[in-house]
């Protein structure tokens, strides 16, 4: 019997220097301080990509897109997610869905949820949903030091009846 496979991932980035643009869930958030990272620091897109790697057994974000790849310096989270989806499909899997939860005090996510989900779904070529929460002023996200995201993904071996 062929069963679906699930994966989980966490991504965390500290806020970068003032003037760094904030990219979260494939969207730029004008007026918000951005995240530090080798790429654009998009914790939502990165967690989604890493959950796909976890579900498919194709490594992790670091193994596939490590800092030793200068061509990915400053890369968008949507580019990373799209590339992750391509790698997972080439490994013989169809993507069922990805669910991500953003953890942080800002930006206020709800007003742009549908827009973010559309951008991430297009990048992954499969449904991506995003929710958001705070950590009640606890930990690095609660103290306003950065953002985190937790993601799960469902993949099915290609030819197993579809996802």
Image (spheres, rainbow, N blue to C red):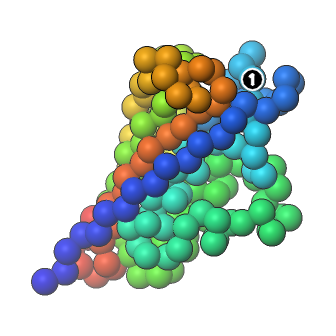
- Give the left or right position of residue 35, taking residue 124 as reference: right
Residue annotated with mark 1: 33
Q: Where is residue 40 in the image (x, y as percent from the top left)?
A: 74, 44
At horizontal 44% and vertical 44% (from top left) the residue drawn is 150
> How many marks on residues?
1
Q: Which of 27 and 16 is in front in this view?
A: 16
Above or below: residue 92 compared with residue 73: below
Q: Residue furthest front?
A: 139
Q: Is residue 104 visible?
A: no
Question: Residue 84's spot in the image, x, y percent?
Answer: 56, 65
Q: Is residue 54 visible?
A: yes
Label 1 Cα crowd, 10 Å radius (few <14 / some 14-19 / many 20+): some
The picture places residue 2, in percent across and down from the top left corner, at: 19, 80
Q: Which residue is located at x 38 percent, y 46 percent?
A: 99
Residue sitting nearer the eye, 16 or 84: 16
Among the 4 quarters of the image, the one containing residue 62: bottom right
Q: In this view, does 31 lie above or below 145?
A: above
Q: Which one is in front, 70 or 121? A: 70
Q: Image check: 89 left or right of 34?
A: left
Q: Position of residue 14 (x, y in %)?
A: 69, 35
Please tell me whether mark 1 sits on a helix, a strand or a loop.
strand
Picture quadrant of residue 44: top right
């Amino acid at each position: 019997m062929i069963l679906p496979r699930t994966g989980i991932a966490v991504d965390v980035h500290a806020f970068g220097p003032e003037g760094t643009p904030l990219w979260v869930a494939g969207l730029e958030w004008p007026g918000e301080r951005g995240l530090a990272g080798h790429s654009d620091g998009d914790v939502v897109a990165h967690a989604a990509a890493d959950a796909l790697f976890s579900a498919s057994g194709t490594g992790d974000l670091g193994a596939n897109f490590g800092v030793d790849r200068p061509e990915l310096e400053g890369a968008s989270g949507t580019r990373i997610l799209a590339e992750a989806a391509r790698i997972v499909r080439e490994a013989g899997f169809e993507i069922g869905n990805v669910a991500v939860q953003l953890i942080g005090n800002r930006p206020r996510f709800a007003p742009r949820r549908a827009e973010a989900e559309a951008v991430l779904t297009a990048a992954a070529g499969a449904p991506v949903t995003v929710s958001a929460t705070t950590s009640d002023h606890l930990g690095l996200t609660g103290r306003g030091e950065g953002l985190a995201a937790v993601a799960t993904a469902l993949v099915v071996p290609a030819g197993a009846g579809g996802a």
